[in-house]
Amino acid sequence: MTEPTSVSTGSSSVLAALVGALRGGSVEVLDLTAPLSSSTPILQLPEEYGQTVPFQLEEISRYDAKGPAWYWNNFRTGEHTGTHFDAPNHWITGRDLADVASVPVRQLIAPAVVLDFTEEVAKDPDFLVEVEHIQAWESRYGALPEGGWLLLRTGWGSRAGDQEAYLNADERGPHTPGLSADCARWVAEESPVIGLGVDTVGTDAGQAFAFEPQFPCHSYLMGSGKYGLTQLQRLAELPPTGAVLIASPLPIVSGSGSPARVLALVERTP
């Protein structure tokens, strides 16, 4: 068995330096996770399809005859409820790829960049990010991170407490921002990132049912063995580059995804 070793930088280890930075405030931990409750918005599919269920708590005992000294609950919900992680097998294009329990843990901690489209989305809720938008960002901030996350900040997270406003649907379906089909293919097949994170209810734009292919973020990313993170909060507090993302889904055997606690480590000036 290989013994663990300490990696040193000068007189202190890397991990000791990180702990010191956390305690001293030069590295801040931000929780990007939306609270999970019965009011958490959920995806709604056309009536002919199966539906996920809202988050539900079922009390087992609460310091009473069923359990005099303890409080606990059962819960019921879908894998793709609230802030959640999409595994490759979530979509038919990735049906033979990893389930959520098989995602390598080293990929659950990765650098992240944030692209801000709040102004565009404020003018057009159906705004679509194109490849040229990402390339323009790269010309200013540098290349997307190898093995990292591409996060889209659209301002949509401010609607997360209201199911109707968050889905923003009318007779033509939901109206929420996302990637164009060409951009989704580029991110999945040509970019170096391992996944896409969004502040909307799902990784695809609201009108993506009418794209070719349908729901291209799911189709291309899952088919390429990449991941999705949805319903992220507080993206406005992240810098364009430099954050480290920690995504922690439950390791559900054969699961297609899981509600996740998503944290970001951000350097701050003490």
Image (tube, rainbow, N blue to C red):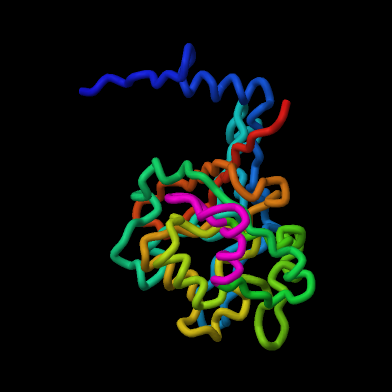
| The one of 108 and 170 positioned closer to us in this rendering | 108
In the image, residue 215 above or below residue 252: below
In the image, residue 133 above or below residue 78: below
Q: Is residue 175 magenta?
A: no
Q: Quadrant of residue 90?
A: bottom left
Q: Position of residue 124 (x, y in %)?
A: 74, 76
Q: Is residue 165 visible?
A: yes
Q: Quadrant of residue 22?
A: top right
Q: Is residue 76 visible?
A: no
Q: Quadrant of the C terminus?
A: top right
- What span is colored magenta in the figure? 131-150
Residue located at (61% from left, 80% from top): 207
Q: Is residue 136 magenta?
A: yes
Q: Quadrant of residue 264?
A: top right
In the image, residue 231 above or below residue 45: above
| The one of 26 and 52 positioned closer to us in this rendering | 26
Q: Position of residue 188 (x, y in %)?
A: 43, 66
Identity of the residue furthest to the left in this view: 1
Q: Quadrant of the N terminus?
A: top left
| The one of 75 and 151 positioned closer to us in this rendering | 151
Q: How many marks?
A: 0
Query: Left of 248 or right of it: where is 22?
Result: right
